[in-house]
Amino acid sequence: MDFQLKTLTVAQAAAEKSDVLIVLVGSAPITSKDPLSVLAASARKAGDLPDKAGKLLGLYRPEDVVAGRVVLAAIGDGKPASVRTGVVAAVNAAKAQAPKRVTLAFAQPADGAAVAAAVTAAADASYVYTTTKSKAEPRSIRQLTVGVADAGAVSAAFDEARATVRGIELAKEWGNRPANHATPTLLGEAAKELAKLPNVKCEVLGPKEVEKLGMGSFAAVAQGSAQPLRFIVLRYHGAPRSQAPVVLVGKGITFDTGGVSLKPAAEMDEMKFDMCGAASVLGTFRALGDIQPAINVVGLIPSCENMNDGRAVKPGDVVTSMSGQTIEVLNTDAEGRLILCDALTYAKRFEPAAVIDIATLTGACVIALGGVRSGLFASDDTLAAALEAAGEASQDRCWRMPLDDDYAEGLKSNFADVANIAGRAGGAITAAKFLQRFTSDFAWAHLDIAGTAWKSGAAKGSTGRPVGLLVSYLMGRAGSADAAGKADGAKAKSGKKAGKAAAAPAGKTRTEK
C-alpha cells in the first residue's frame, strides 16, 4: 500500500480524488466552517456520532465531496490508542466496498504520534495474506493519503511509521507462511534479500559451521528433522563501528511438533507461528534499511524444525551448549530455550550494548498476560524501562515480569548443570531464568511473545508484533546517541574556543617580552 502525507484541511480533503474519505473526529471543538466539518460537529452534538473511539457514521455521496462515500470516525481524546481504534473501525467498514484510493483526514490538529498510529492501524486493518492462495484477493486499497493541518511538522513520524509498516508486514508474511513454505533454508534466503538494503549485511551458517562453533544445544533440537538448520547473522551499520551494537535474537522454530514430548493434535497447525520471533527480527531489519538510523544492530536467528525421527533428542538426554554448560532435556517441547541459549552465547562476541531476545516461548505467558501485552523480563532496569516506553509509544505494549533467583530452584538437575524445564508454576519466569544463565556478560532483556505474535480463530494470522516495539526502541536509542554526540561536539567546540581565548593573552605576553 502506498502511503502519502499531505497538508489538508477537511474542506481540502473533500476535494481529493478518492473512493472513500475517512474523517477522524476527536472530542475537541470543531472550529472549521466548511460543510463537512459543520456536518461532523452537528452529528456529534446530536449524539449520532458519540465521542467514544471507534464509533462511526457513514455518509453516501454528500454534497461538495468528491469521494462517493464518507466515514466519520470518532477518535475520542485523539491519543494514539484512540486514533488506532477509530482508524481500524473505519478502514474495516470502508474496505467492504473494495476501495482503491482512500483519504484519511484529521478534523483537529494531530501530532506525530497520532499520525503514526493512523498509518500502522490502516495497514493492519487492510492487510491480506495471499502467498499460498491460488485465487488471491489482495488488499483493495492501493493508496492511502493522510491529511493533517501541517504535514511538515509530522513528516518524520510519518516516514518512520511507513517504514515500520513494511517491517511489520514482512514479519506477518513469514509468520503466516505454512511451514513447508518457510523452512530454515527459506528463512535464510529471506535474510539474504535484506542484505540488498543500504548498510545491511547477512551471513547464513549451516550445520557444519554450527557444529564447529560448539552449539550442541541448538544442534540437538535440529537433529530430528530432515530440514537442515540455519544460523542467520544480520548486521546493520548506521553508526561508527566503535559504537557497541544492540543485538536482537529471534527464535526461529519453523515448525514445532514438540518432538518426542509430542504436542496435542488440536491447533498444532499454529506451531508454524513458532518462528515469529525470527520474523520480527527480519521485519525490524527491513524497517532499519528504510529509516537508516544512526545505530548499529546485529540480528541473530537460530532456525530449525523440532521434529521426530530416530535421531531426535529424547527426554533425559544431556547436551552441551556453546557456553560449555550441560543441559538435561527433561521435555523436548521446551526447545526454544535450547536454541536461544547458544545464540545468546554467540552474541557475546559483539561486545553488545544490550541484547534482546524475542520468542514465542511459553504457554504460561499466554495464561499470564493473554494477547494484549508481551511478557518482558530484564536483567537491567534501564533497558527494561526503555522497552516499556517503546511499547507504549508504538501501541505494541509489554509488561515487566519478575526474575527472582528463587524461581531458578526448579531448574536444578542431578545429571547436568541445569534442566531445561522446572514445574508448571511460573513457567514463563522459569524459562526466562534458564535463558538468564547465558547472559551474565551484557545487559539483557527477553520478550515472550507467545500470546501476542499471532491470533487464533476466525482472525487467525500473524500480528507482526513486536516489530513496532523494537523499531521504536532502536529509534529512541539512536536519537539519544545522536543527541549525546551533538552535546559532546558542542562541548569540544566550546573547549577549543576557550582554549584559543586562553592562548591569546599568553601569546601576547610572550610577544611583549
Image: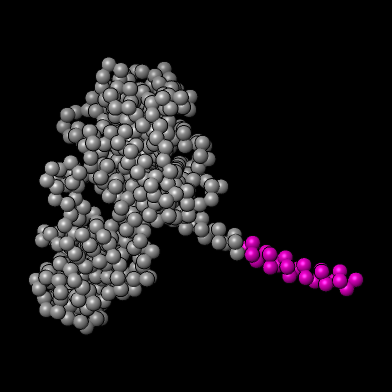
Is residue 511 rendered magenta in the image? yes
- Image quadrant where one finds the N terminus: bottom left
Magenta stretch: give its range. 491-513
* Residue 479 as seen in the image, left or right of residue 226: right
Quarter of the image for the C terminus: give it.
bottom right
Q: Nearer the viewer, residue 464 or 141?
A: 141
Secondary structure that dominates the magenta span: helix
The spot of residue 481 in percent (x, y) is: 51, 55
Q: Where is residue 166? Give x, y as percent.
A: 30, 52
Name the spot of residue 143 as percent of width and height, x first: 22, 62
Taking the spot 25% from the left edge, 22% from the top edge, the residue there is 308
- Indicate whether 224 appears above or below 194: above
Viewed as shown, does residue 180 lie left or right of 221? left
Residue lying at the far bottom of the rendered structure: 33
Residue 291 drawn at (x, y percent) = 40, 56
Residue 321 in view (yes/no): no
Identify the image quadrant of residue 204.
top left
